[in-house]
Amino acid sequence: MRLAGAAVVTGMALLAGCHRGSRDEPLSYKTSPTLYVHDGFEQKKLSGAWARDRFEDDAVVMENTVVRAGKQAVAVTVRSHDKFEAGRNGDLDTERDELREDNQLFASENVAYETSFGMYFPADFPIVPVRLVIAQWKQYCGSETSACSDQSPVLALRYINGDLLVTQALSGAHNVIYRQKGEFRGRWLDFKFRYRFTPGADGHVAVWIDNKQVVDLHGVTADAEGTGTGYPPQGQNHFFFKMGLYRDLMPQPMTVYIDEYRKRQLAVGEF
């Protein structure tokens, strides 16, 4: 995956020419004075905000049965061996179908953003004690052969054995920063994340679930840069977002519905 050379805020050429308000527009957006993206999945096809490299062709479907707002949402279904990846360094084999934000929308280091979205897990969604990541932010590594290429997401939302978890992985250490038990199937869940990714002490992550704040974390929020880690020099790091279903190998399929995705850059001092 090659990072586009354009700046995250101004590099929105993929959206040029679309007109606000049309059903077939890729998505609502603005680039000045700061980035703002809204995808309600109301269009006939998946918008240009999303890359196509993390899901199988039949895994992502625009649908109008389970909807958070508007007339449509998107259904993501993972089946056995979708986008299969062999385990490395002792990890289990994995499969996935995820929406990855386009390269031009990557977050920049030490810049604050807010991302929100709704998810719906059907009443018969499998409850299993295996790795299941439903949203994640990865620090961009730049090369599949670098030391950082197999690192876990710096921030992730997981749904494991019926529990919702927010996790952080830094310098090889994995931490659960929030865990909530309960029944989350059969209803819409609204998630909001605010974040400023930096290897310095001024990093910040805040999380809301159904409008209730559950995380307010200050401190290191990204891996250190340098030749030892494989990440770019300080100030040049980027972070990309994915949502959907990423799991250990399983025989049965899973489906999640997603709606009302938003991302915006926050003003200086806002977070």
Image (spheres, rainbow, N blue to C red):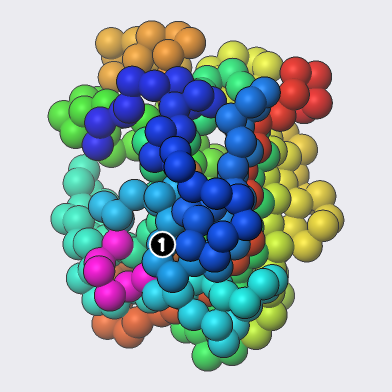
The residue stretch that appears in magenta: 55-60
Q: Residue at x 59, y 14 (%)?
A: 200
Query: Quarter of the image containing the N terminus?
Result: top left
Kind of element beneath mark 1: loop
The three-letter code of the residue at mark 1 reads Leu
Q: Nearer the viewer, residue 4 or 155?
A: 4
Relative side of 114 to 96, left or right = right
Where does residue 128 sit, x and y in percent of width and height?
46, 77
Q: Residue at x 47, y 53 (%)?
A: 26
Q: In the picture, residue 77 is in which quadrant? A: bottom left
Relative to 64, does residue 144 appear above or below in the rendering?
above
- Examine the rendering and report whether any part of residue 120 can be seen: yes
Q: Nearer the viewer, residue 34 or 93?
A: 34
Query: Quarter of the image containing the C terminus?
Result: top right
Q: Which residue is mark 1?
A: 46
Where does residue 40 sit, x and y in percent of width and height?
59, 62
Overall secondary structure of the magenta section: loop
Where does residue 223 sit, x and y in percent of width and height?
46, 23
Q: Residue at x 74, y 58 (%)?
A: 209
Residue 85 magenta-highlighted: no
Badge 1 crowding class, 10 Å Cα cut-off, few under 14, some 14 to 19, many 20 or more, is: some
- Examine the rendering and report whether any part of residue 133 can be seen: no
Q: Residue most toward the right?
A: 212
Q: In the picture, residue 56 is in which quadrant? A: bottom left
Relative side of 185 to 267, left or right = left
Relative to 132, does residue 227 appear above or below in the rendering?
above
